[in-house]
Image (cartoon, coloured by chain):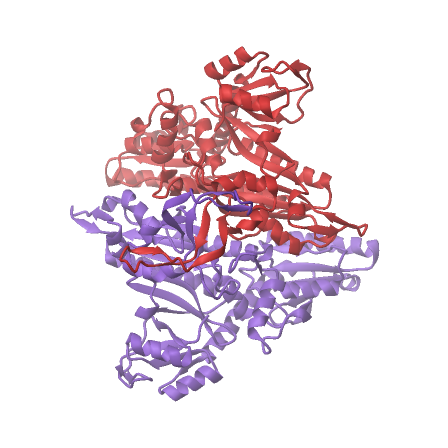
Chain colours: A red, B purple
């Protein structure tokens, strides 16, 4: 099984696709750019949803659901917004099919043309702010803290499973506030929620920062982001949080009466993470034998495989394994006892390795005699023989150890791949030979940013938060600069 | 607040809309036929999802996710299916907008026309069976037990919040089996899961049955359904489970190699329930003062309202209420302590009554002296003074009592509204004057069924499972019949 995976060193991109497809996370579909999320991949998404949803609710947000369709005219109400999304949207123009009178099968009924075309939501600011207009009258209605779990569609020309698909699943928070400070604080808070999730559950260290103006969300005043680093040295944006100022409130005429009885436009934020995070998870930790799941987010944390010949040995093993499985479950650990007899232990080992299950416990007749079990870690591949006595507690701490190890490994890799560079030749060379983030001075103009992108394919990933001020000169133009920014080639 | 609700007796339909909108469940949107599900309504949906999802997983199902879009040609592959869904679907024809060169704002880019139109899924049999083709080769791949939580779109001409909307949220199970018996058993099992949920969580008794051929799902061999009765005497289909035979397997060429090494088409089921259930819940239990939530499905089970003057009284109340709230939470009860000072107790009482919170606890300074609290049930409106000592346990059993009472009340109503009728005049009269289910003989033809519908607006809701055989004559044609079926006017 594991032999079918292309080696990272040979073809990183194919390695990724092999992991996603053969690891049972997703599959291509018959619809261009849309994927099928398979049960194991969806279980991972459910784990992500469950943790994030808990964090959203802890921070006072409520879920709601808004229409899939956005009237074309809504998109146009915020100038930058339509500019950013009009070029890649699915447009509904008709509401009925009919039999072709000329025998050409089923065709679109020309008489069922919509008066106004509907856009399948690429993001929901417009339809939501149009609704908020009726929900918000006074400061008493604020803050309004809403999140939506939904599917969205962006008609991307080049797609990749999880990383960039025409349809994807995500959550989008949309909040309304009485003051600018409060909205900025909300955007920052949600960035922290995302960073905490990605670092502590996905075991992926991230840099928090703001986007340069050219990379901002279409309609935002400021876009905050978290950027992670993949094993091939490319960066990946794992989540964004936008301070929208009063742009959407003005576009949709959402005003409120303040405590001081003054009419003012509402301040807004929006923030989202998507199934793209699954792509990040795969690329951050996996190896040539398959996926590697951080225990805190793994759909399955432990698998137990019995090794036996005949019913008597199986029965004897069951007597030890069933209580062990129960004890693990009682300790809140997700565990599967795979005693199916249609596959041999070796095949099962490879299968769970491919799926990245953090801990595998194998037990045979001799182990039983010795009162031990073979415990294998997916992250380091180390196998040890451990006493059955006290094993559940040992497994619980082992899972935490694995979680920590994956994070530390990714952090070390990231730290080794942030390079400070002061001239353009080195900049180019570091990108080509080492990859990773390059910390360099930039003159602050969109022209230079664009030029660097053309020359090197690297973009400004972010201007890190709490960035130290430092005098320097732009690596391309030599113009003065007051701080370094992080460049990288990116997904 | 409660005064704004139209009385049931005055205008049942307006009463329903008032409850949905003023109770905070949903709202109309700017998009024809699409609704906004508001936070309280969505919280209810999340409760439903959580219970059902648990039941699906217990019965061996896994969640997955398939594309929102269905190629037009897929819909046509199953003849009855396209007939059923082509007339009401949203069709995506283009993938880009552009600025009108003539200054007409943003228009559809005629150059971005799709080669094949995409249908926004009205249900996912076709796209899923097209995928199953690649997932199923051998009996070892069966059964395949998959569920999807998703949004679907059916371009209904007349819509009503929750009951019939262009877009709605639902789950759709799609399973594949090696034998006919196994598939039929699955369809029946899921019907039982639905009935158990609707009866034991939503407190709504249902009749389980099969649909007449005319009312079957487009593409099914048999459609099983659960039918509930609303307070106005109209029936509502709360869920359906379909035995699809080999129809979709044949349409999409899904064959498997059996244990006996023979190639055969796969047997299928599909089953679904939707946000329509929220409409059923509202209409089954609510009254003129607002919603009435069955405790087991209520987003909020208990609200505690303090009644005080000044900080000292408030502080004294907190000392008793905070531990009470904690004890309720520890007992697994969802509870809110509403000590906000921007509304008076009377306003709060009306608000929680409108929202249907099952139990309200009010506590004032005098109650505290007496060591009691005022406990009000939403279902019966009975208020009693109960000792604070032991209150959490008392509340827990009260919630169960309310759950049972709501179910019994609905059951009594339903039993009183099943009328056996043997002639057409009485049939018509019962429908007009009493409503409810009418149990009558029917000659088994689609023509008679259609004629009865034309004359009375009543449809065959179902042929109950385990229906006793009984000789009789069709109420319309007088032709012989061997069993009674249930007619009703329906949502």
Q: Where residue B279 sits in the image (x, y, percent)?
A: 51, 65
Towards the viewer: B245 or A262: A262
Q: Is residue B391 left or right of B222 when viewed as pictured?
A: right
Q: Position of residue B102 (x, y in %)?
A: 53, 45
Residue B90 placement, left or right of B84: right
Residue A426 image offset from top left, x and y in percent: 53, 11
Q: Position of residue A348 (x, y in %)?
A: 31, 34
> Taking the image as drawn, is residue A435 in sight?
yes
- From the viewer's side, name the closer residue of A336 and B369: A336
Q: Is A240 placed above or below B311 here?
A: above
Image-based side of B180 in relation to B46, left or right: left
Residue at 58 percent across and 56 percent down: it is B38
Work out whether residue A330 can be spotted: no
Residue found at the very far front of the displayed protein? B102
Question: In the picture, residue B361 is in which quadrant?
Answer: bottom right
Q: Residue at x 38, y 36 (%)?
A: A303
Count of numbered circles on the image? 0
**Left or right of residue B328: residue B260:** left
Reply above or below: A430 against A380: above
Quadrant the N terminus of chain B occupies? bottom right
> Depth check: A154 or B151 in front?
A154
């Amino acid at each position: 099984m594991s032999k079918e995976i292309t080696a990272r060193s040979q073809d990183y991109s194919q390695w990724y696709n092999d992991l996603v497809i053969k690891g049972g996370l997703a599959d291509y579909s018959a619809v261009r750019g849309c994927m099928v999320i398979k049960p194991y991949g969806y279980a991972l998404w459910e784990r992500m949803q469950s943790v994030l949803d808990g964090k959203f609710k802890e921070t006072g947000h409520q879920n709601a659901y808004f229409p899939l369709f956005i009237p074309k005219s809504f998109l146009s109400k915020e100038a930058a917004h339509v500019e950013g999304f009009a070029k890649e949207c699915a447009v509904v123009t008709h509401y009925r099919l009919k039999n072709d009178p000329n025998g050409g099968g089923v065709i679109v009924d020309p008489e069922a043309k919509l008066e106004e075309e509907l856009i399948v939501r690429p993001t929901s600011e417009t339809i939501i702010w149009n609704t908020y207009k009726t929900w918000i009258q006074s400061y008493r209605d604020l803050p309004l803290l809403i999140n939506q779990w939904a599917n969205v569609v962006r008609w991307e020309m080049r797609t990749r499973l999880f990383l960039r698909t025409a349809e994807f699943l995500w959550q989008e928070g949309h909040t309304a506030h009485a003051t600018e400070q409060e909205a900025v604080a909300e955007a920052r808070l949600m960035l922290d929620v995302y960073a905490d999730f990605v670092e502590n559950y996905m075991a992926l260290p991230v840099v928090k920062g703001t986007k340069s103006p050219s990379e901002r969300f279409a309609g935002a005043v400021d876009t905050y982001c978290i950027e992670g680093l993949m094993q091939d040295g490319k960066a990946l944006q794992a989540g964004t949080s936008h301070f929208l100022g009063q742009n959407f409130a003005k576009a949709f005429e959402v005003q409120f009466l303040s405590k001081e009885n003054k009419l003012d436009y509402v301040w807004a934020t929006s923030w989202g993470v998507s199934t793209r995070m699954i792509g990040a998870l795969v690329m951050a930790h996996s190896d040539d034998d398959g996926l590697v799941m951080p225990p805190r987010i793994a759909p399955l944390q432990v698998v137990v495989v019995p090794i036996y010949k005949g019913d008597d040995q199986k029965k004897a093993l069951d007597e030890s394994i069933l209580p062990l499985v129960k004890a693990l479950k009682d300790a809140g650990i997700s565990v599967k006892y795979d005693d199916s007899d249609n596959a041999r232990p070796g095949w099962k080992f490879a299968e769970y390795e491919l799926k990245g299950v953090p801990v595998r416990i194998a037990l045979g007749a001799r182990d039983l005699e010795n009162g031990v079990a073979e415990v294998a870690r997916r992250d380091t591949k180390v196998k040890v023989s451990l006493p059955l006595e006290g094993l559940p507690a040992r497994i619980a701490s082992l899972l935490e150890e694995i979680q920590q190890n994956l994070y530390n490994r990714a952090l070390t890799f990231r730290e080794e791949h942030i390079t400070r560079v002061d001239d353009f030749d080195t900049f180019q060379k570091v990108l080509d030979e080492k990859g990773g983030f390059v910390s360099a001075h930039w003159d602050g103009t969109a022209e230079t940013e664009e030029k660097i992108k053309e020359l090197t394919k690297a973009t400004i990933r972010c201007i890190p938060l709490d960035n130290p001020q430092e005098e320097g000169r732009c690596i391309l133009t030599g113009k003065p600069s007051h701080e370094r920014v992080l460049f990288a080639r990116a997904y």
